Amino acid sequence: MKVAFIGAGVMGEAMIAALLRQSTTSPGEVSAYDIDQARLIFIENKYKVNCASDITKAVSDCDTVVLSVKPQVLAKVMNNLKGVLKEGQLVLSIIAGASTDTIGKGLQHDKVIRVMPNTPAQVGQGMSVWTATSAVSQAQKETAQKILSAMGKELYISEEKYIDMATAISGSGPAYIFLIMEALTDAAVHIGLPRKMAEELVSQTVLGSAYMSRETGKHPAELKNMVTSPGGTTAEGLLCLEEGGVRAILAQAVIAAYEKAQRLGGQSSK
């Protein structure tokens, strides 16, 4: 499987690392291009993949082209690749907000898959939500599944409108969780726990809670109630969170991220 990465930032690197870790492809079958030459040299030295100084050379001999650049530079990338891609090549975009229609028209290419991955892909625990244009073949969809499965779980959806919504949840979600973890750790230190101990308690608590939710299949409210004894410490803590408006502020964060994803889509099409 020959894959070219246009953009070697955090998510691009995460995908490269995942593909090589799972032996989905080999370093010799991966090419990369980035406008940041220092970043490109770093990727080449770390993963021993083929790095190109010219964007057209990077995509010339591959089956799949992964677009992993910032939304703000997508228009320039599409202009450089317009009319360059071969009929049988698959374009897999992980660019927030950029629709398949925008990418297809910008590249003059109809075989486009749009994906919203997330950063836990770096450790094989990512969540990727994706969709495809009608021109994408079943074999190409299976190729996409192999690539995304190397990073963790993948979910295909037929309606593209859900991609921007997923961006606000699974795409941005890790940052929300990390913020909560940071806050819990700082609070633990505030009450007297050593920081290393606090970090271990918080990380395992988050990991265990997520695993328990997935394995039991129980509603989060039911699991929460299992922890909460009448008049107990957890009830007291939950009351404080509710009075602080934690539900409302999380909802506002998701809505803000969703609206930003939609605005980015407008920018990338210009």
Image: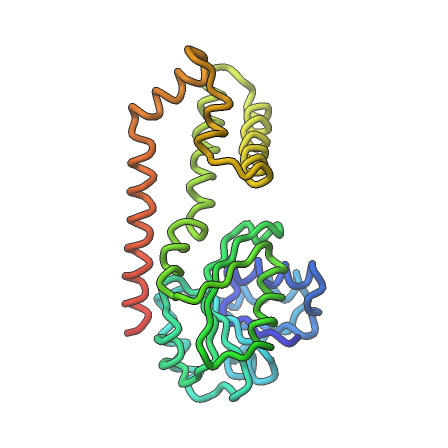
Quarter of the rendering containing residue 100? bottom left
**Image position, residue 138 (x, y; %):** 57, 76
How many labels sit on residues?
0
Residue positioned most to the top: 231
> On screen, 218 above or below 167?
above
> On screen, 35 above or below 237?
below
**Image position, residue 257 (x, y; %):** 33, 51
Is residue 25 in view? yes
- Compared across the picture, whether 27 is left or right of 10 comes to right
Depth order, front residue of 7/205: 205
Image quadrant holding the C terminus, namely bottom left
Depth order, front residue of 29/147: 147
Is residue 35 in view? no
**Image position, residue 195 (x, y; %):** 55, 24
Q: Residue at x 53, y 63 (%)?
A: 12
Q: How is the image coloured?
A: rainbow
- Compared across the picture, whether 113 is left or right of 98 comes to right
Q: Residue at x 55, y 58 (%)?
A: 154
Quarter of the rendering containing residue 187? top left
- Compared across the picture, whether 55 is left or right of 239 comes to right
Image quadrant holding the N terminus, namely bottom right
> On screen, 89 above or below 68?
below
**Image position, residue 183 (x, y; %):** 43, 30
> On screen, 59 above or below 38?
below
